[in-house]
Image: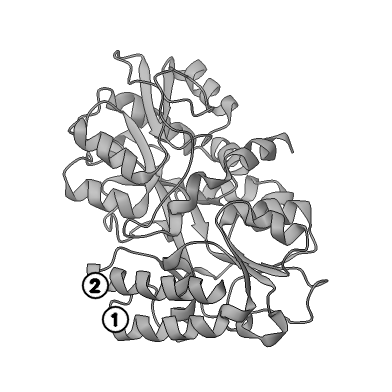
Amino acid sequence: MKKWISLALCLSLCLGLFAGCGASSSSAGADSSTPAASGSGIAAEPVKGEGTLNLYTWEGMFPQDVLDGFTAETGYEVSYSSFDTDETMLAKLEAANGGDYDLIIADDYIIETAIAEGLVAELDKTKLENLGNVNPLYQGQFYDPEDAYTVPYGAGVMTLVYDPSLTDVEITSYADLWNEGLADNIAVVDNYRVINGMALKVLGESYNVTDTDTIRAAGDKLLELAPNIRLIKNDNVQDDLLSGEVAAAVMYTSQVTLACLSNPDLKVVYPAEGVGFGIMAQFIPSEAPNADAAYAFIDYILRPEIAKQCFEWLGYYCTNAAADDLIEEEYQSFLTLPDGFDSDMEMIENITPEAEEMHMQVWTEFKAACE
C-alpha cells in the first residue's frame, strides 16, 4: 500500500484529463533548476549527451523502481522535469522549437495543439516492438486519429461514486443525481466541461456539442441540480465522501481509486448515459536531442510487467491490454474498465470558442446558484 501514499501526494497531477480546450490545470510541482533522475518530479534542466533521457511530465508519474530499472537495463540516465499545467509545457516546447526534451507526457487536448504547430515528431513504429500491447480503445482518438505521433500512457474516466449507507437513493445514472433525496449531499469536481457535460449527457447530447442553445439548455438543467450540490472542488474530493460529508460524488479516476481502497463498500457507477474520458499520451518532440532514448523508454514501459507497475502506482486506467490480467486483484476494478463498456465512452474534445464561452457562462451561473 505504500505506493498509494505517493499517489495521494500527487493526486492532482492529472486533473486536465477532462478539461478540454484550455480548461486544464493539472497541478503538480513547479519547475526548478535542480536536476533529478527520479520520479520525484523535481524539475531538471535538459541534459546534453547521448546517455540521458530528458523526460518532461507531471510530478510522480512513475515509480522509482521503473526508472531505475530502465537505467540499469539501457544505460540511459533519466533527467526528470515536471510542469504544473499543460499550458506551461506547451509554452516551453514552443520556446525550444520542439527541442530540449526527448519525451513528453501530457493531456490529449494540448497534444492536438502541439501536433498542429509541428512540435511533435512522427513515430518510427519499427522502434517500438511492444506497441501492439496498447489497448485499441485508447487509440485513433481526436488528437491523433492515425496514431502517428503518440502512444497512450494512462486514461481517466469521469466516475460517479456513492456510499449506500448514507443514502436510500440507488444511483445508476447521472440523472439520479437530480433526485430530491440527495439534497445538499453531492460533491462534484470543479471542471465545467465535465459537469456541464454531465447535464448534456442527461439530455441525450454529446459532451462536444457546439450549438450554444443546446449548451444553454444543459445549463438550465444544471440549475435544477444546484440544491443537491454541497461541494464543488478539485482536490481530495474522496476525503469528503469517506468522511461522510457527502453521500455521492463525481470524481477523477485517481480519487475514485483512493476512495474505494479505503472503503470497499462504496458503489462505483458507470452512468447509463455514458461517460467522458481523457488520455495522457507520450510523444517525442520534433527536435528531441535524444530520440533513441525516448523510443527505448516508451518500449520499456509498454512491456506488460512494467506497465503493471506503472498503473498500480499511478492509479489511472490501464491503456496496456497485455497488462490488464497482471494487475493485482485489489486494483482490477479501479484500473480496468468493465467488459463491453467501450461503446458508452466519449472523449471530451476541443470545441469552438463560441461554445466555450457559453459553457463558461452557464458554469458561472451554476456555481452562483450552488452558493
Residue pictured at 22% horizontal, 39% vertical:
121
Q: Quadrant of residue 131?
A: top left
Asked if 359 appears above or below 170 in the picture, the reply is: above
- How packed mark 1 is, by other alpha carbons closer than 10 Å (few <14, some 14-19, many 20 or more), is some
Residue 204 visible within the image: no
Q: How is the image coloured?
A: one colour
Mark 2 lies on a secondary structure that is: helix
Asked if 53 appears above or below 282 in the picture, the reply is: above
Residue 348's x, y, as percent? 39, 65
Q: Nearer the viewer, residue 278 or 85?
A: 85
Mark 1 lies on a secondary structure that is: helix
Position of the C terminus, as image quadrant, is bottom right
Q: Is residue 225 left or right of residue 181?
A: left
Q: Is residue 110 left or right of residue 82?
A: left
Callout 2 amino acid: Glu
Callout 1 amino acid: Thr
Residue 28's x, y, as percent? 49, 39
Position of the N terminus, as image quadrant, is top right
Residue 160's x, y, as percent? 62, 68
Q: Nearer the viewer, residue 172 or 310?
A: 172
Q: Which residue is mark 2?
A: 354
Q: Which residue is mark 1?
A: 212
Residue 293's x, y, as percent? 35, 24
Q: Nearer the viewer, residue 4 or 188?
A: 188
- Residues under labels 2 and 1: Cα distance? 7 Å
Q: Quadrant of residue 10?
A: top right
Q: Assess whether mark 1 and mark 2 are in contact (beta carbons under 8 angstroms).
A: yes
- How packed mark 2 is, by other alpha carbons closer than 10 Å (few <14, some 14-19, many 20 or more), is few
